Amino acid sequence: MIKSKKSKGRKEKITDNLVRDFFMQFSDDIIIEQETSENPSIDKLLQTASKKGLGHGYPDFIIQYKKDKNFLIVIEDKADKLYHESSDHKQYDKYAVDGALLYASYLSKSFDVLAIAVSGTSADDLKVSHFLHLKDEAKAFPYFGDCLLSPEAYYVGVNSSEEKKRQDYDKLLDYTRVLNTKLHSMKIDEAERCILASCILLALRLPHFKYYYTTEDNQTILADHMINDVMDWFKKENVGRNKIDIIESKYSVIRGMFAQKSKENKLQSLIKDMADNIDAFEKTNRYFDVLGQLYVAFLRYANTSNDLGVVLTPTHITEFFAEVAGVNKTSVVFDNCTGTCGFLIAAMSKMIEDAKGDIFIEKSIKKNQLIGIEKGDKMYCLAASNMAIHGDGKTNILPESGLDPKVIKSIKAGIEDPDTGIVYKPSVGLLNPPYKADKKNDEEELEFVKWNLEALVEGGVCVAIVPMQCAIAGEKKARIYKLKKELLEKHTLEAVFSMPDELFYNSDKSVVTCVMVFTAHKKHPVNKETFFGYFKYDGFEKRKNLGRIDARGRWSKIKEEWLYLFRNRKEVAGKSVMKRVTAKDEWCAEAYMETDYSTLSQKDFVNTIKQYIAYKFLSNEETV
């Protein structure tokens, strides 16, 4: 029996019954309370939530999830549809939408809240409105459609929303700072922090360890047990002796971190902290490069990333790449300088989504269709662990050079599934090459693009982000010019996007970049027009302690506009242009794009001059 505190008329009770009967179908998964709540946290938040400003107030229904205490549904209903929604949403006691929004505003101080307004007295003709008010956000926004859905549909819909992802991501960024401070206080070396984090995150995927770590009081024994459990898992997955030796050698440093006797089990505390903050995040953001975010944060705070030539691509750009390349469930994706596997994880996410729940296709994706190369032992350990964390136990990440012709040849030949005999050959290349530190001796970034393309099937798509210098270099830059020429002789340059100047701000890098899109093994036609996009504004803003984030939720619409312009080869003044180019030419929109001068101001001119001078300075070039 559901208790009720209000005295309602006959018609209002009919509406109540319709709502209650609908949600009672799902009572195994939810707790339904009517006009009251026995949850102390909810009750406290509603102490002053009366619609008439007279103290306690309760919505018609409060629904809690048994599996997640952080998400609530509140429902207000009215018998008469005329009282469904007011124009200003401030007539709380009179209209269903207004009342639901009021209660959501109080409860959102501690919960994510879905506010539902229902009006009508017939199950076949109910009027329904939904508004999502995320925790600590200023206001709610319309979400879902105009009919009631199952609690599971609401749960999945909210947790997969762009707004929820953005909020979760911001919280994750904030936590990386907190975690880094904690590891610093534990005197764990900056360069080893991500190795420790990767081992903990992988161990938390093992059911036995998830229980065991809460019972072991000795941190030295716990560290040893954690490493052994993880390595046993890799061995059972038949990853290969060479790969296992590399991973085990890197994880062995963890034992030294916790070898000292201590009354406090710092490792146990750390594991619990990460389980509460990161493991919980990954439950609703399954295919997200959390380890990559930690890597960026740790090196950024340590200020040592410039020594590594490593620039990790922001998550929203790795996802953008997957869409540019048209990644789907049949794609075989290859990255020959994979870093922490950010591109492969973004591709995995799109592929799993396209599989639409088919577990056999999902298994094939993780087993056969994601291929990476990472030469450095430490980065290889992170890459292999990261793929394992995301369910790719076999891990086709090779500890080799991404420029080795023999390795590329073997990858081009494909991976044969021993169970089916099907051979999987790379059809999509996604990469962010290591950026040169030594201009004379380091490999050119376009070398990695060249060998990535070599591994792809004819007609495959390669998307690479490289320094702008690679695109604008002419004949005077002999090495780059030669590579540009070779690329056009074998492949088609479909597009080049000029990217935001501070795209790698979170990695503590100031390099100006562009994205190149090629079709593999089809010579660039003489009369071919290439698409050039001026994609300098992605909506991200710098925030203290968080770095560069999508603070106003603008990226989603901007991304759709970029994809629309590229896919349809649209020319828009100030944004995009089509142009025939050769290896001698500059491959960037700035060189050919028409400017809409009506939108320019004196401030724009000054800012452009400043950016130009800064670019020349950072590139060690003379200004003229």
Image (cartoon, grey):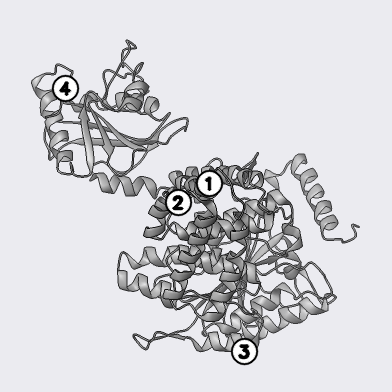
| SS under mark 1 | loop
Against 564, residue 448 (above or below) is below
User: Which class describes the residues within 10 Å of circle 3: few (<14), some (14-19), or many (20+)?
Assistant: few
Give residue 9's mark.
Answer: none
**Which badge, 3 or 1, comes first in the chain's sequence?**
1
Residue 214 vs residue 98: left or right? right
Identify the residue position indicated by label 3 in the image. Answer: 406
Q: Tell me whether the residue at label 3 lies in contact with that at label 4, contact meaning CB atoms closer than 8 angstroms.
A: no
Residue 318 vs residue 191: left or right? left
Identify the residue position indicated by label 2 in the image. Answer: 216
Q: Position of residue 420 (x, y in %)?
A: 34, 86
For the point 32% across and 35% down, which residue is it? 72
Identify the residue position indicated by label 4 in the image. Answer: 4
Residue type pointed to by label 3? Lys
- Of all residues, the one furthest to the left in this rendering is 10
Residue type pointed to by label 4? Ser
For the point 56% across and 70% down, which residue is it? 248
Which numbered disc, 3 or 2, marks the residue closer to the eye? 2
For the point 53% across and 80% down, which residue is it? 241
The image quadrant where one finds the C terminus is bottom right
Against 189, residue 130 (above or below) is above
Out of 607 and 92, give the one closest to the viewer: 92
Q: How many angstroms separate mark 3 from mark 1 (CA)?
A: 48 Å
Q: How many angstroms separate mark 4 from mark 2 (CA)?
A: 47 Å
Out of 104 and 481, give the one closest to the viewer: 104
Residue type pointed to by label 2? Glu
Q: How many angstroms separate mark 1 from mark 2 (CA)?
A: 9 Å
Q: Tell me whether the residue at label 1 lies in contact with that at label 2, contact meaning CB atoms closer than 8 angstroms.
A: yes
Identify the residue position indicated by label 1 in the image. Answer: 265
Q: Position of residue 308 (x, y in %)?
A: 73, 64
